[in-house]
Amino acid sequence: VQLQASGGGLVQAGGSLRLSCAASTRTLSRYIMAWFRQRPGKEREVVATILWSNGRAYYADSAKGRFTISRDKAKNAVNLQMNSLKPEDTAVYFCAAKLYGDVAYSYWGQGTLVTVSS
């Protein structure tokens, strides 16, 4: 599975951005898709995940109520709508995929930089 992330950029605090991750395979029904981020000086952390088969989502506490992960079956893509952005959301965001039941994410897209100015 090849993943191509897009949508990063510079936004003011309180603004919104939408990230998109296009997958090269059309057989995602057995996959969990995710967005991670790596903030400056921090370890990579999960932001949100979605089970492709039923759309069930999980959010890190930092994302709850502000971010929404969704799947676009027509485009074979996973989106991350980010609202009410804060300077501490500044990070490189990565999309990732793994087969349901696997522990580790095996497939990663290139990062996309999100910068939130105060």
Image (cartoon, rainbow, N blue to C red):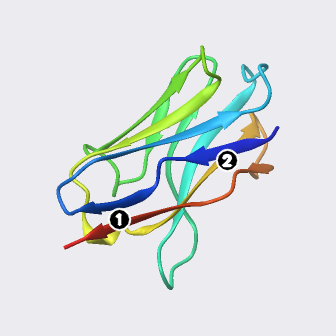
Residue annotated with mark 2:
96
Residue annotated with mark 1:
89
Please, what secondary structure does the residue beneath circle 1 have? helix
- Residue 71 locus on image (x, y percent): 53, 25
Disc 1 to disc 2, how far (Cα)?
Answer: 18 Å
Sooner in the amino-acid sequence: mark 1 or mark 2: 1
- State the residue at coordinates (55%, 47%): 6
- State the residue at coordinates (55%, 49%): 35
Q: Is residue 1 above or below residue 114?
A: above
Q: Along the line of sight, which residue is nearer the eye, 77 or 98? A: 77
Residue 51: tell me if it is visible.
no
Residue 6: tell me if it is visible.
yes
- State the residue at coordinates (60%, 14%): 74
- State the residue at coordinates (33%, 58%): 62
Please, what secondary structure does the residue beneath circle 2 have? strand
Q: Specify few, some or many for label 1: CA neighbours under 10 Å numbering under 14, 14-19, or 20 or more.
A: many
Q: What amino acid does circle 1 point to?
A: Asp
Q: Is residue 15 left or right of residue 22?
A: left
Q: Is residue 81 left or right of residue 74?
A: left
- Residue 67 locus on image (x, y percent): 34, 44
Q: Is residue 72 left or right of residue 22?
A: left
Label number found at residue 16: none
Quadrant of the snapshot with the N terminus: top right
Q: Along the line of sight, which residue is nearer the eye, 78 or 6? A: 6
Q: Specify few, some or many for label 2: CA neighbours under 10 Å numbering under 14, 14-19, or 20 or more.
A: many
Q: Along the line of sight, which residue is nearer the eye, 8 or 60? A: 8
Q: Along the line of sight, which residue is nearer the eye, 114 or 31? A: 114
In the rendered structure, are the residues bearing label 1 and label 2 in contact, judged by CB atoms less than 8 Å apart? no
Q: What amino acid does circle 2 point to?
A: Ala
Quadrant of the snapshot with the C terminus: bottom left
- Residue 48 locus on image (x, y percent): 48, 45
